[in-house]
Amino acid sequence: MSMPTFVLASASPARRRLLQMAGIEPVVRTSHFDESLVQDPNPGVLVETLARCKAETVASEFPQGLVLGCDSVLALRGEIHGKPANPEEAIARWRQMRGQVGDLYTGHALLDRTRHRQVVRHRVTRVHFAAVSDAEIEAYVATGEPLVCAGCFALEGQGSLFVEKLDGCHTNVIGLSMPLLRQMMTELGYQVVDFWA
């Protein structure tokens, strides 16, 4: 049996880079799924549902595909945060986050179109934020980086300067837990090494 095409249902360059660094060259299809259609007070359920919806949106294009959808949110003091709407919201969010500990949830949905099976999981990583100053917050938001990231920071970018410590999988914070992906692929009967480019 020929190997399915590995498809990333995400516009995230960080997720694509993680896969490429691990030897997987994905076909990228942006899902354009409207995230506002899904609401859930449980962050684990929310990210799993969003990840599955994103994967399902592009899956019909790839009848021989292994389609990966992902979604991330930050839970802080009982509130769930995705991407900030504007710089003002990003500044206000960082003032709440500084010196605090948040939980970064990433949902992963892997749809095996060849065998009509799927695995949906999420992983949580605790993020300890630095006690940054107002000037640092404003300078960081001015870079534009926090505006395109769930949780208002990018661990693989300038935001790494403002994270003191992580408890758990670091690639999960970037948007894709590589150990979890390997486990999910194994569960579907695939070896990750077979997808090395």
Image (cartoon, grey):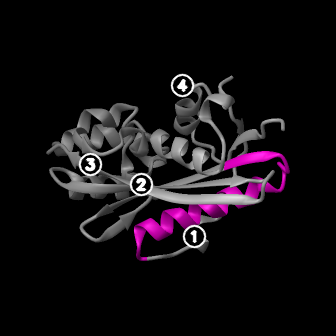
Residue 174's spot in the image, x, y percent? 43, 41
Mark positioned earlier in the residue sequence (1 or 3)? 1
* Neighbour tally class for label 2: few under 14, some 14-19, many 20 plus, Cα within 10 Å: many
Label 3: element kind: strand
Residue 1's spot in the image, x, y percent? 84, 38
Label 1, label 4: how far apart the Cα atoms are: 32 Å
| Residue in front for this viewpoint, 3 or 111 | 3
* Neighbour tally class for label 1: few under 14, some 14-19, many 20 plus, Cα within 10 Å: few
Q: Give the side of residue 3 with respect to residue 30, left or right.
A: right
Magenta region: 41-67
Q: Amino acid at mark 3?
A: Val
Q: Amino acid at mark 2?
A: Arg
- Asked if the stretch drawn in magenta spans residue 42, the answer is yes
Q: Which residue is mark 4?
A: 21
Q: Which residue is mark 1?
A: 36
Q: Which residue is mark 2?
A: 123
Residue 80 occupies quadrant: bottom left
Q: Is residue 104 above or below residue 192?
A: below
